[in-house]
Image (cartoon, grey):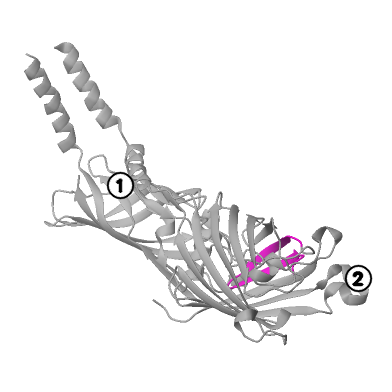
């Protein structure tokens, strides 16, 4: 009697875990570019945490902002962390919400979807709708996206003295490989 | 039986009810397992007169010009000290991110100085949290004023420090500096060759680019009876690749053996020097 019940509990547990198709980021790169008249600044990070639930059509990404590297000098990187993004106060950039659009995680193909949700950078929350490509292949699932972030939207202020060196709108590109969990 | 089914249904509904917040908290837990270095405890490699725990990054070349004017108490006749000026011209270089070397030449007592600086611990936050940053500082100075000393060795002195600092908040960083200074040869009026000192200081950011700094060196047994402990109060002002430091201090010398042990002015009697440090950083090679 008791055995049967335990089996039932495990069965129900098992069903829920196969039912929810959760995938997590196994490797990823996020790069941003600031293209200003006097200076081009490029930085990137591989420290991208992400999880997608294709069944509930939900996603969440977190990036520790201080992990961005590249820049034109170590001092520039320090200013990025200290003066602009204030990573001591706001350590993580977050984006989480819902996946909207046609796609099937079980059949191969490229699907253009919209990621609609909460975009949190520098402690300022914006609702964003970002076009992304979900590529389902026999090897796995990749996602990629490119979008723009206006610094003003996140209360990142550029002093007039460096106005010609930092773009007002930052270009971001991301790609990630996913593995099931 | 019914109860068990109820429980399992309950469990299932818990799984289903979990939404984005669950995904997000899953990631937040993952991040909590990582360790992050604490950056930029101080804006510059100097707190005011003395060094901070900060080191120049690899291949960074820093050109420093420091001035200490005469005494403000000299009044309008001396234009509050601006008629006199001591200068130190210095070069700092990052061999690695953690190992720096530097040389300098001071007009005060025509002194040459050199130092080695090595960062042995870095403050971190996160899983493997390290509460402080620690940097070892070793320096040598040679006075080249014409005197009766027969050898260069006799004109040499050493100042060695352990710099320990913690960034408490993005705005507030504090540092303590146990220090040992040794003079190879002292004058008849001076009391001892070895001086131990404990320094303390910090910075408080007033705005994103301006901070208020303070620095004090305590000596229990000084070099001679007429010296005072060194006190300095100043501002760091940062603009792009430059850091300007403006300060008020009772010390005339700009190197450790000098300002720690050879300060002959009483800050609280108004015998204060105005001064500034300017540093310009050049990136010699990209990684």
B283 in relation to A118, above or below: below
Q: Secondary structure at mark 1?
A: strand
- How packed is label 1: few (under 14 Cα within 10 Å), some, or many (20 or more)? many
- Residue lying furthest right in this view? B77
Mark toward the viewer: 2 or 1: 2
Considering depth in this image, is B87 or A19 the residue closer to the camera?
Answer: B87
Q: Position of residue B150 (x, y in %)?
A: 65, 87
Q: Which mark is residue A180?
A: none
Q: Residue at x 56, y 52 (%)?
A: B170
B46 in relation to A103, above or below: below
B51 in relation to A9, above or below: below
Q: Residue at x 11, y 27 (%)?
A: A11
- Residue lying furthest front in this view? B188
Query: Where are the magenta residues, as a range?
Result: B228-251
**Please, which chain is the residue tagged with disc 2 on?**
B
Q: Which quadrant of the rendered structure holds the C terminus of chain A?
A: top left
Q: Which mark is residue A99?
A: 1
**Residue A116 lies within the magenta run:** no
Considering depth in this image, is B79 or A168 the residue closer to the camera?
Answer: B79
- How packed is label 2: few (under 14 Cα within 10 Å), some, or many (20 or more)? few
Q: Which mark is residue B75?
A: 2
Q: Which quadrant of the rendered structure holds the N terminus of chain A?
A: top left
- Asked if both marks, 2 and 1, belong to the same chain, the answer given is no
Chief SS of the magenta region: strand
């Amino acid at each position: 009697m008791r055995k049967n019940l335990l089996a039932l509990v495990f069965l129900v547990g098992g069903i829920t875990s196969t039912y929810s198709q959760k995938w997590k980021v196994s490797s990823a790169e996020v790069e941003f570019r600031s293209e200003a008249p006097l200076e081009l600044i490029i930085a990137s990070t591989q420290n991208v945490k992400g999880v997608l639930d294709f069944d509930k059509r939900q996603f969440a990404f977190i990036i520790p902002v201080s992990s961005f590297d590249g820049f034109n000098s170590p001092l520039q990187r320090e200013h990025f962390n200290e003066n602009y993004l204030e990573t001591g106060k706001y350590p993580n950039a977050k984006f989480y919400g819902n996946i909207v659009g046609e796609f099937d995680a079980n059949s191969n193909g490229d699907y253009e979807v919209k990621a609609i949700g909460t975009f949190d950078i520098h402690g300022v929350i914006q609702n964003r709708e970002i076009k992304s490509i979900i590529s389902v292949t026999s090897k796995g699932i990749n996602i990629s996206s490119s979008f723009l972030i206006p610094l003003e939207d996140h209360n990142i202020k550029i002093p007039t003295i460096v106005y010609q060196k930092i773009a007002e709108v930052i270009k971001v590109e991301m790609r990630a490989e996913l593995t099931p969990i | 039986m019914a109860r068990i089914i109820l429980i399992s249904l309950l469990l299932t509904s818990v799984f289903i009810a979990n939404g984005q917040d669950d995904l997000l908290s899953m990631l937040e837990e993952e991040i909590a397992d990582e360790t992050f270095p604490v950056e930029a405890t101080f804006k510059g490699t100097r707190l005011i007169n003395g060094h901070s725990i900060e080191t120049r990054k690899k291949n960074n070349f820093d050109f420093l010009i420091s001035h200490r004017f005469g005494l403000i108490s000299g009044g309008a006749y001396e234009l509050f000290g601006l008629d006199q000026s001591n200068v130190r011209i210095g070069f700092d270089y990052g061999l690695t991110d953690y190992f720096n070397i530097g040389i300098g030449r001071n007009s005060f007592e025509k002194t040459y100085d050199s130092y080695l600086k090595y960062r042995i611990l870095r403050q971190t936050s996160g899983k493997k949290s390290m509460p402080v940053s620690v940097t070892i500082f070793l320096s040598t100075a040679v006075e080249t004023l014409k005197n009766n000393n027969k050898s260069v060795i006799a004109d040499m002195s050493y100042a060695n420090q352990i710099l320990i600092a913690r960034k408490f908040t993005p705005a507030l960083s504090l540092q303590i500096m146990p220090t040992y200074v040794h003079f190879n040869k002292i004058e008849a009026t001076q009391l001892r060759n070895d001086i131990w000192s404990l320094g303390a200081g910090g910075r408080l950011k007033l705005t994103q680019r301006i901070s208020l700094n303070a620095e004090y060196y305590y000596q229990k047994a000084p070099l001679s009876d007429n010296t005072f402990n060194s006190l300095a109060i100043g501002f760091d002002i940062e603009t792009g690749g430059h850091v300007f430091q403006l300060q008020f201090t009772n010390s005339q010398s700009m190197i450790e053996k000098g300002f720690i042990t050879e300060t002959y002015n009483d800050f609280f009697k108004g015998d204060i020097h105005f001064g500034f440090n300017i540093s310009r950083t050049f990136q010699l090679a990209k990684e």
